[in-house]
Amino acid sequence: MGTFALYVVATLLMFGALGGLAWAFTGPGVSGRTQKRMAAVAAPAGGRAGNAAARSPGEPGQRRKNVTALLKEIEKQQKVQKQRPSLRKRLARAGLAISPRGFWIASAIAAGVVAFLCFVTGQNIIVVALAAFAAGLGLPRWVVGFLTKRRQKKFTQEFANAIDVIVRSVRSGLPTNDALKIVAKESPDPVGSEFRTLLEGLKVGVSLDQGLKRMYDSMPTAEVSFFAIVMTIQLKSGGNLSEALSNLSAVLRDRKRLQGKIKAMSSEAKASAGIIGSLPPVVGGIVFLTSPDYISLLFTERVGNLLLAACAVWMGIGIAVMRKMINFKH
């Protein structure tokens, strides 16, 4: 009867943990705040474009309509981009030159190796299955996500410098395509590789706006979205390209400065979260080294395995909540 009660308690704890995790990542008001920020970013841009079109000679009404239609089209494209991408696209965004088939083969090999190690060490069949599942599905996807974020961060750090190169080239009298060639040749990867892909598309007949769409699809960051909007509006409505790109470069540098301030202000909270999150496994490791017989029941008995699983779930929930609290969108 006691074992049955422990099973029931462990099941209830697991369901409660899953519910808390879902609430932590899909809490109320996230989508509303995102839409407000998108509207705040898009409205001034549209207003400036509309005012510029109204002041310009020629056909101000038609120009204003073109800019409005263009902004609506870009907004639709961004909504489509928010959908879950395919595995092939995620691998390309991470900079991995492997096919989805190769990814699944590597995942299967990782799962088999971990399952074999757990089986050799005499672990329970449930532990073996959970470890194989985590190594085959969780670990490879985490690696892809980590590489994608690292590549996007590296791209963002060099992107403002690339825009400055385009501004100086255009002001010196070079055509836009030649300025893009200079960036593709001189900028480090992944900025150089993305611009080289853009130029290769232009050589085979792809229009500039279509090439920018593909560039945003490959590198879905806010900076690339701003660049695509500025270039497309200037292409279809005209205006001073060097001045628009210079303003964009200043905006990107301000965003980078703001990111540094946020990182500095949240460093204390992140350090506290790291200490709190590392205490349970560190204390458990010390107890295992000093009194192995005292803690070995958690690994040898079924009830101990259930308690370990429940502790892992609750630790994951706590780490996820702390991560949600110390990460700020800007």
Image: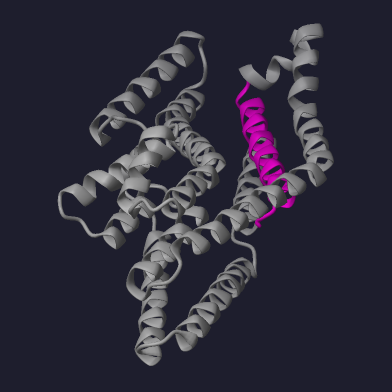
Which residue is pictured at 42% across the width and 53% down the height?
170
Q: Nearer the viewer, residue 110 or 68?
A: 68
**Residue 249 location (% of width, % of height):** 56, 54
Which residue, as the protein is rendered here, is positioned at the far front?
172
Q: Nearer the viewer, residue 108 or 76?
A: 76
Q: Is residue 317 magenta?
A: yes
- Quadrant showing the N terminus: top right
Magenta portion: prevailing SS class: helix
Q: Nearer the viewer, residue 317 or 49?
A: 49
Residue 200 visible, this angle: yes
Colour scheme: one colour
Which residue, as the protein is rendered here, is positioned at the far left?
204
Q: Is residue 258 magenta?
A: no
Which residue is pictured at 81% across the width and 7% down the height?
290
User: Is residue 140 shown above or below 218?
Assistant: above
Left or right: 88 in relation to 93: left
Residue 1 visible, this angle: no
**Residue 214 location (% of width, % of height):** 31, 53
Which residue is pictured at 50% across the width and 45% down the height?
159
Q: How many numbered discs, if any?
A: 0
User: Is residue 288 shown above or below 257?
Assistant: above
**Residue 72 location (% of width, % of height):** 40, 77
User: Is residue 293 shown above or below 164?
Assistant: above
Magenta region: 301-330
Q: Nearer the viewer, residue 98 or 272?
A: 98
- Quadrant showing the C terminus: bottom right
Q: Quadrant of residue 289?
A: top right
